[in-house]
Image (cartoon, helix red, strand yellow):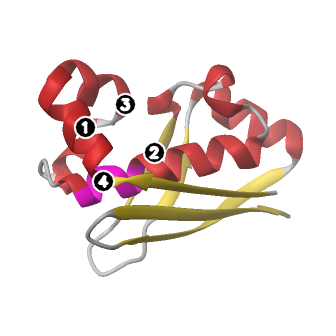
Amino acid sequence: MVGVDLIEIERIAQAVQRWGDRFLLRVYTPGELAYARGRPPQLAARFAAKEAVMKALGTGVRGVGWREVEVVRAPGQAPTVRLHGRALARAQRLGLVRFALSLAHSREHAIAVVVGERQ
């Protein structure tokens, strides 16, 4: 299962300006917020990753909560996906055991590509 998402960094920056913590706490986990430290490119890349995972799961944003898809990154490691709740249950039903994730951003856009892997 594959998912791809591209987002304008400015769109995330505007959401943060307009909604502040209400937006941030609805979409991002504490770990994601700590990693991004308010930087729009990092927030946008994680937002794109969440949408890409939701596409790979075949649910879209209606079937899985934003915080049920988490992008984690250990120091010196590539980012990975950790699922919770309904997202984890959906992945298990599909037989997906892990996700390969690639994130990138330019000045204007962030992109995420995810491939769900079966055992």
Q: Residue at x 70, y 44 (%)?
A: 55
The amino acid pointed to by label 3 is Val
- Mark drawn on residue 27: 3
Mark closest to the chain's N terminus, 4 or 1: 4
| Percent x, y of residue 17 | 13, 31
Q: Which residue is mark 4?
A: 9
Q: Residue at x 27, y 24 (%)?
A: 23
User: Does residue 64 appear left or right of residue 55 in this picture?
Assistant: left
Mark closest to the chain's N terminus, 3 or 4: 4
Q: CA distance from mark 2 to mark 4?
A: 19 Å
The amino acid pointed to by label 4 is Ile
| Percent x, y of residue 86 | 66, 25
Q: Which residue is mark 2?
A: 70
Residue 46 can be seen, yes or no: yes
Part of the protein shown in magenta: 41-46
The amino acid pointed to by label 1 is Pro
Q: Residue at x 52, y 62 (%)?
A: 112
